[in-house]
Amino acid sequence: MDNPEGLYELNPDVIDVPEGLHLVAGVTGFADAGSAVTQLSEYLVDTIDHRVVATFDADILLDYRARRPTIYFDQDHLSDYRPPRLALYLASDEIGQPFLFLTGFEPDFQWERFADAVMQLIAKYRVKSTTWVHAIPMPVPHTRSIGVTVSGNRTELIDAMSIWKPHTQVPANALHLVEYRLQQLEHPTVGFVLLIPHYLADTEYPDAAVKALELVSAATGLVFPTDSIREEGRDFISKIDLQVESNPELAKLVGALEERHDAYMEGNPLRSALTDVDGELPSADEIATELENFLAARRNSEDDPPFRR
């Protein structure tokens, strides 16, 4: 296998990276329900101090034909090309605590080599713990707190926060592989998978980013400014609630999801909030039917404001 160092380039201007920091990670690719990871990354980059420590080689890791970068066409010439980036940053939280932040596109190729590269950086900087965030669409209501499935080897976080503990096969994220390798080394690691209402999965759902920030804080003790994104979340939910109130089909869907959720929370704690009264997980067809009903309701209500902001 090629040397994993060939996948990334260290920034020669940043040589003062402290040892023993927490690593926070999130990549976008196959699934990013509610744009949770995208919003988390953009929000942190926009609101906290950060410097690039290492940049990964997109020409090696990215399938450009599957995820084409954008370029701006300005009347008669091309401008503002923004190449995709996957990078490791040295950042500081709201009270000045330093941490490492890995974010950007999810690699399409060379996952094993990518995982080796991340572990190489973790060893180089003697990372204290690794925390990563992911988000998937699930049949849950937006009127309840966002649930989370927790993986890794930090049992105190799993026991306290993991609402759904399935026995199932799932499509992997590149950071799943990193977590798997880190577990083998007994490195403290935790993965948070946010369970996002399926009917909001294709939107920028601010509460998903807030939840992600809260989870990272719980795992690391880092403190982040969230006032502005919480305000966005309140405005967003108000618009959703208006649509629910004016659309009987959507109201029926949300009501059914609420009943399922509440029955779980008040009943058997070992049964997933996503199952029915018999403990069965809804099938893909059942989820698709609910989603189709929702989309049909949207199409039939021309006066509804759009979900996308």
Image (cartoon, helix red, strand yellow):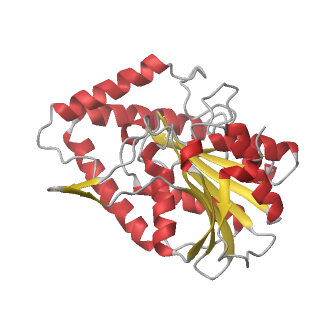
Q: Residue at x 36, y 25 (%)?
A: 290
The residue most toward the bottom is: 95
Q: Is residue 289 above or below residue 200?
A: above
Residue 98 in view in this figure: yes
Across and down, in percent, residue 279 comes to 61, 23
Q: Quadrant of residue 79?
A: bottom left
Q: In the rendered view, would you say 82 is above or below 69? A: below
Q: Residue furthest left?
A: 303
**Left or right position of 263 against 250:** right
* Image quadrant where one finds the C terminus: bottom left
Where residue 199 sits: x, y (%)?
37, 37
Residue furthest out toward the front: 77
Instruction: Report the residue at 76% width, 69% height from top.
Output: 21
Residue depicted at x 73% and y 45% = 115
Residue 80's quadrant in the figure?
A: bottom left
Horizontal relation, residue 11 to residue 195: left or right: right
Observer-nearest of 7 and 248: 7
Residue 151 visible (yes or no): no
Q: Residue furthest right?
A: 185
Q: Nearer the viewer, residue 268 or 253?
A: 253
296 versus 7 height, above or below = above
User: Residue 306's spot in the image, x, y percent?
Assistant: 22, 46
